[in-house]
Amino acid sequence: MDLKEIQNLIKFVSKSGVNEVKLESEDFKITIKTGAKSAETTIVHQASMAPTPQAPLATTPAPFPVDAITAPEENSNLLEVTSPIIGTFYRRPSPDTTNFVEVGDSIEAGSVVCIIEAMKLFNEIESEISGKIVKVLVDESSPVEFGQPLFLVDPS
């Protein structure tokens, strides 16, 4: 069934006064529901039994920055400050101020290290560990996931 046939069927159903029409064939299933103001159409194409290869998406972003994945032996003594929520990462409270922390800064447990914006709320993220910031793993204004490492901290 092509697009013109579907459009003609929708027009016919809306003029006929019928509330719902279902049509099934080997290749597809179509349901047309009409209401007082508008018509709703659902078209479901059934998958064929033979698998079809799909091209990989070229624009799929990696969940974490590549440099966040490090060899365990190399950073075995380092601890991570991770994101407690999903949102957008900011290193400073406003564009015209300095960053909360820089590489080389010492932090204490409870120190604010960044802000994560989630649903228009700006949440100050406090460190749960004490130590020295070794590396910032996320770029300014980047999206972050729950549990994603944000900073590497040397606890010694």
Image: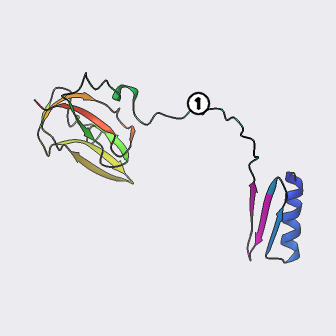
In the image, residue 56 above or below residue 94: above
Q: Residue furthest top?
A: 74
Residue 69 percent coordinates (x, y): 35, 28
In the image, residue 1 above or below residue 63: below
Quadrant of residue 80 within the rendered picture: top left
Residue 59 percent coordinates (x, y): 56, 33
Of helix, strand and loop, which mostly describes the magenta segment? strand
Element marked by disc 1: loop
Quadrant of residue 90 within the rendered picture: top left
Residue at x-position 24% and y-position 25%: 75
In the image, residue 118 above or below residue 73: below
Residue 45 percent coordinates (x, y): 76, 53
For mark 1, what is the residue? 58
Q: Is residue 32 magenta?
A: yes
Query: Residues in magenta?
Result: 29-45
Left or right relative to 17: residue 147: left
Looking at the rendered image, the quarter that the C terminus falls into is top left
Residue at x-position 37% and y-position 38%: 141
